[in-house]
Amino acid sequence: MKNAVDVSNILLPLFYLASFAIYLYDFQKDERRLSNVKRLFLFLTLVFHTFYLIARTVAFNHPPITSVFEIFTVLAFSVSFSYFILELVTDIRGTGLFIIIISLIFQTISSFFIIDLTEVKEVLRSNLLGVHVLHALLGYAGITISAVYGFLYLMLYKELKLNKFGLIFERLPNLEILEKLSFYSAIIGFILLSVAIAIGVIWLPQAFPNFSYLDPKLVATFLVWLMYGIGITTKISGKLQGKKVVIFSIVGFGLAIFSTIVTNFLAKSFHAFY
Amino acid sequence: MNLLAISINHHTAPVTLREEVHLSNDEIKSYIDELKEKYFSEGFIISTCNRTELFGIPKEPATSYRELENFLVEKKSIDNLTDDHFQKFFSCSALNHLFKVIAGIDSMLIGDNQIMGQVKESFQLAQEKQFTGFLVNRVIDSAIRVGKRAKTETTISDGAITVSYAAVQLIEKIFSNLSKKSALVIGMGETGKIAAQHLHDKHIGKLSITNRTMEKSEAIVTEIDAQILPFERFKEHLADFDIIISATSSPNLILTKEEIKSMMKKRGNSSTVLMDIALPRDIDPEARSIDSVFYNDIDSLNIIVEHNMKKRKDEIPKVQHIIMEELISFFGWYNSLEVAPTIKSLRDFYEEIRLAEVGGYKNKFTKEDQEKLELVTKRIINKLLHHPTTELRKAAEQGTNTSEAATKIALVRDLFGIENKSNTDV
């Protein structure tokens, strides 16, 4: 099993690279025959990644959520999986490469630096923690995808304003759809993060005796959550639209990344398990 | 195959001549009657604003292009129409030309979306008048297949190639559902009318138009279900519109940047598309600097048109490849109608049955009787096949693949189930 994990760890970035290459080629050439091939290849990559995550869990007797680089591989999976579902539901196929590249980056970093941990803290074996992390990661995948669509919106917006009608103009869906994709991804991300925070708040006092509600990680996460909450409410009330919605999403994502870096690497938090 | 065709089109004649030659549906019907009587056993006539073409299988092998040209010249009483204004095609080149026409690569606007419908309508007229027979029906089937394949397998008809349609294409890159949007078209000249028509075709939610004088526009207003705004007061309602298309002949600006700014304020900076397709321009180009305003003029729309035109031209080789495949397929079928292979296939068919039946009962006869059996059964087969074989040969002797011979051959192949075998052989 250990060998299968090691081989899969090397192959996974290559699978994501191949998926990215097919999506990129199709974006440039727009060949109808590739339309289903690229989707099939992404599906195979996700199946392979699922096998890897299960194999890793079995081989090391804990879910892969105990280190940054284990979380990166789950995040890579979450982002591509969320995109895959989005592509199936909306049948908008021209934006995959911008999402898959994120999975490729996360998976490559993970594959390079991941360490095989057989001994982990007892607290990390909790089922409730698993549910908490799963929701948090899918939530982060949601806001990541939201930010990517936000960027695509701004790119197309700029091309339209400057009357440049290149590949971005031809291949991307229209501005309203990009705005909707960004907004709905943000809503899904927000709901999942809300669940993750709720589980965390209920479970934390039981699991950590030194827990404090003023912990930097908790405060930063709450601020990110609050920002998305305000953005979504304002958009629904009709006070925020178009470019401002996507800028809100991008700033929210930037804040989420910033807070993660600060709290994980710089500040002392109970949330650091490794 | 003796398919004959003459064509007067945008390659050979100016628009004035093409207009004179153009045939209405009623004219086509009456011309078909005469063509049937004098020249063709079967055929069809295509007539659009860019081409008038006669296709047919001549009754007499001696029928010439000149006779057909004269027929058209005399019927339309056009003196200045000469032989140089006609393209002439025969057999494979006639079919190739028809395929190019229906696929849109012979059109003035390459990849023209309307031509396939127009050609199909011509086929229907011919079928209604019972001007199509065994051969022409097969030609029609092949042509329609070429048209469909060109549309589905290539991007020959993709993208806007007129300024007014490019404007609509651009609007669709900003808004996802036009049925929830409102649009105002300023100016009801030819360009304005076409733009309004395009918006109507795209199911725009609410369409308003304004013009200095509305007399000329009443017909189109009813047709496209638009509201009329008095020209003097349309600026009061600017904020109600997501899309504003301006196409007047005004020498001065109609909408200034300040007016657009004030409109955007009222709209809460909601995305607004301004399409200025007038020359000189109607809307201050500086309006493009306002946030959430998407301003385009003729120059920027022309970029899209030229880009799409180039892409369509790049698709021509793919369409030609489809045409080549269909020509090969058609002539593969057609050549299978040659009389000699049909007679051979027919004989083989009977011989197989004879051998199987004789083989089954052979042991019940003495050696001497077996020889007699062979002889008798062969004689029966020969007698049975004598008349059909003679008839087929006679039909073929009237000329290579005449319509009558082809029909008889096809019937024999169909009745005896030897169609597929011969096609595979080809």
Image (cartoon, rainbow, N blue to C red):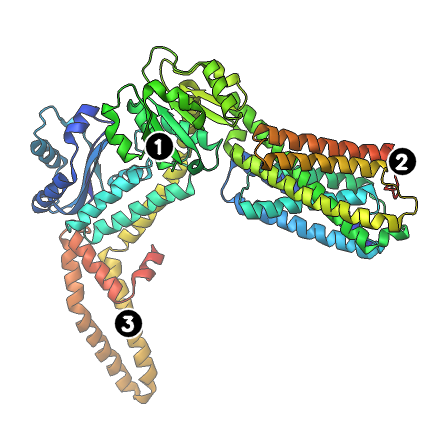
Q: Answer whether labels 3 and 2 touch (C-beta < 8 Å).
A: no
Label 3, on which residue? B351
> Does residue B130 sit above or below B416 in this rendering?
above
Residues behind callouts 1 and 2 on a single chain: no
Q: Amino acid at mark 1?
A: His
| Front residue of this view, candidates B403 and B339 | B403
Mark 2 nearby-residue class (10 Å; few <14, some 14–19, many ≥20): few
Q: Which mark is residue A268?
A: 2
The answer, for residue B92, to whether it is visible in the render is: no
Q: Report the front residue among B273 and B59.
A: B273
Q: Nearer the viewer, residue B320 or B79?
A: B79
Write down the residue under mark 1: B198
Q: Secondary structure at mark 1?
A: helix
B8 left or right, relative to A224: left
Query: Label 3: few (<14), some or many (≥20) within 10 Å?
Result: some
The chain letter under disc 3 is B
- Asked if disc 1 and disc 3 are in contact, CB closer than 8 Å, the reply is no
Q: Tell which tag, 1 or 2, sits nearer the viewer.
A: 2
Q: CA distance from mark 3 to mark 2?
A: 96 Å
Do pointers 3 and 2 mark residues of a single chain?
Answer: no
Q: Residue at x 82, y 32 (%)?
A: A262
